[in-house]
Amino acid sequence: MEFTDVLFNRRSIRSFSDKPVDEKLLNDILTAAIESPSSSNTQPYKMAVATGATNKALGKALLDKYYTANKINSMPLPMKVVSAVTSGALPDGDFKPILGKYPGEFQERRVKTGHGLYEVLGIERHDRESRDEQMARNFTFFNAPVAIFFFIHPGMTHTALIDLGIFMQSLMLIATDKGLGTCAQGALGMWKSPIKKHFSLPKEYKLVCGMALGYPDDHKVNDYRPPKVSLDDLLITAKN
């Protein structure tokens, strides 16, 4: 595809077919993404790629964590505190997720995106159970045969996050060009312990997030593309 076609065709895929991704194709995509720019070419990131049995085992472990945490969240406060400590379901990722509302206008954009997604899926606003089930699908990577977990070196401070974002964008665009789909997932940064059971993680690197990768199926959710803000919304006005 032409580059602009790739850019406009990329979207978050939330339903994948069970068609496996050829190992050579996957390696080609990841290798091409390495050409991404980074601060002084430091490339302060690493990734753990889960396929096959590892993918399934990790999905099950993360899903169990989610269901346990969700159950605890509905308990009375005293029981919630005890269960959270003893269950092993407390998030043990390296970066704290944003809980509750986002600040200011970002919460408005978040809510609009969520409402649009649930509308496509036919989930009513009051249907908490269906919303929870949709959230749960994050932890089995929306059935994607490839799950990628991303880590940064904290010694590079904020530049590591910038560089990782550039790398992830390159990866997503290359995958789109090859006919695959992706979904960047902040939720996959919530629990690190299941990943540690399957990968020899370098101690100094911190888990940031994950990504599902595979072939999109024909589910209507994959047609959802939330509107972007306008250029005027992003431009800062110059002083006279």
Image (tube, rainbow, N blue to C red):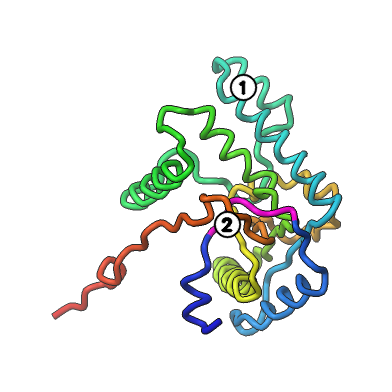
Q: Is residue 187 above or below residue 178?
A: above
Q: Nearer the viewer, residue 84 or 157?
A: 84
**Residue drawn 65% across the image and 48% down it:** 142
Q: Considering the image in quadrants, where does the C terminus appear?
A: bottom left
Q: Residue 168 placed where, x, y %? A: 61, 68
Q: Which residue is mark 1?
A: 81
Give the mark, 2 or 1, whose residue is nearer the N terminus: 2
Residue type, label 2: Ile
- Residue on which disc 2 sits: 13
SS class, disc 1: helix
Q: Is residue 166 left or right of residue 87?
A: left
Image coordinates of residue 119 in percent, x first then y, are: 41, 42
Image: 82 above or below 4: above
Magenta region, residue range? 12-18
| Alpha carbon distance from label 2 to label 1 | 36 Å
Residue type, label 1: Val
Residue at 29% in and 67% down:
230
Residue ID at (67%, 44%): 139
Position of residue 197 relative to residue 145, above or below, is above
Secondary element at image label 2: loop
Quadrant of the image occupied by residue 100 = top left
The answer to whether residue 26 is magenta is no
* Image location of residue 106, percent across then percent down: 37, 52
Q: Is residue 110 left or right of residue 40?
A: left
Q: Dot 2: few (<14), some (14–19), or many (≥20) neighbours within 10 Å?
A: many
Q: Main secondary structure of the magenta part?
A: loop
Q: Which quadrant holds the N terminus?
A: bottom right
Q: Are marks 2 and 1 in contact (CB under 8 Å)?
A: no
Picture residue at 39% right of the left edge, 43% below the top: 115
Q: Nearer the viewer, residue 208 or 211?
A: 211
Q: Is residue 159 visible?
A: no
Q: Residue furthest toward the front? A: 218
